Amino acid sequence: MYAMREAAAAFRRAPVLTGLSSAMVGLALFVVGLFSLVTYNLRLALSAIEERVEVVVYLRDDARQSEIDLLLTELAGLDEVRLVRFVSKRDALERARVELPEFGELFIDLEVNPLPQSLEVELQPGARSPEVVEMISDQAMAYPFVEDARYGREWVDRLFALRRIGAASTAVLGSAFGLVAALIIGTALRIAIFARRDEIYIMRLVGAKNGFIRRPFLLEGALAGLMGGVFAWALTYGTYRGVYSYLFEIAWIPSGWIAIGLASGCAFGALSSAVAVRRHLREV
């Protein structure tokens, strides 16, 4: 109770410094929140695209059915493969007529079907990485009756590169703003400690331990961090509503991520306070 009363009193004594500390934590977490919003929606979009990642194995026209069945069985037996579909030349032509109606007349006038027969290899969720699709492609190409195997290597590589860029950007920018917030909180607490140095001196004279003295400052830092987390959540949600209403539809981040953000703000404030108090109590 003493620590809570002192922390609340500190907010009343220096509202500007406390507000500044909370705002800096909030801005640091706001950057993380924005990148989390972008990263989450990017992940949803990439997941939808990933579902279409597959390896298409084109077969020669003179391939025997027994050879095709052998390759189909071996590919279907791989742990990374969910399904293998055989597409005949006729099925490929019918699909082209449906999916490419602008070339309908061209397909009707054809005397010979130029489209190859193929095997479409659908991968298991979580196994659609560039390494897996390349491995399956190389394995299929080892058969002499396989003419080609394609999986869109360039855009698959870009797909996973976008994920890495989003994660790295969030970590770097969030850490930079977090460092600035830590400096602000440390400065504010140092001023608070020196403003109460007479009180702290008397508490030491009557036998108060450093842990007892630190407790209100740690709680003050945790509350400032929590306020910053709430501020960041409000800014992030406002940005989300603005984009959703005036630009395009996006998804809101999961509630678990919000809870982690608020907890991170609280822990960040307490940790910054602990470092500042430990350093500056020696000077009192």
Image (tube, rainbow, N blue to C red):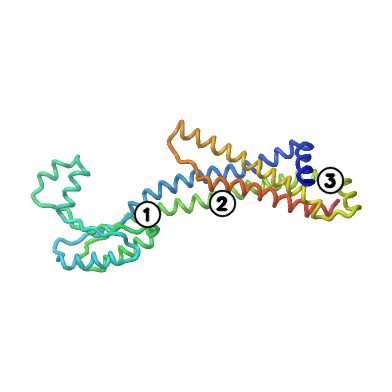
Q: What kind of residue is marked 3? A: Phe
Name which of mark 1 and mark 2 comes first in the sequence. 1
Residue depth check, mark 3 versus mark 2: number of the one nearer the observer: 3
In depth, the one of 5 and 239 nearer the eye is: 5
Name which of mark 3 and mark 2 comes first in the sequence. 2
Q: Please give the residue where the numbered disc 3 appears in the rendered image.
A: 194
Q: Please give the residue where the numbered disc 2 appears in the rendered image.
A: 171
Left or right: 100, with 242 as reference point? left
Name which of mark 1 and mark 3 comes first in the sequence. 1
Residue placed at 10% from the left, 47% from the top? 110
Cα distance between the residues tagged 1 and 3: 58 Å
State the image quarter where residue 7 is shown.
top right
Q: Please give the residue where the numbered disc 1 appears in the rendered image.
A: 156
Per the image, label 2 sits on a secondary structure element best described as: helix
Residue placed at 24% from the left, 66% from the top? 73
Q: Residues within 10 Å of mark 1 (few under 14, many from 20)?
A: some
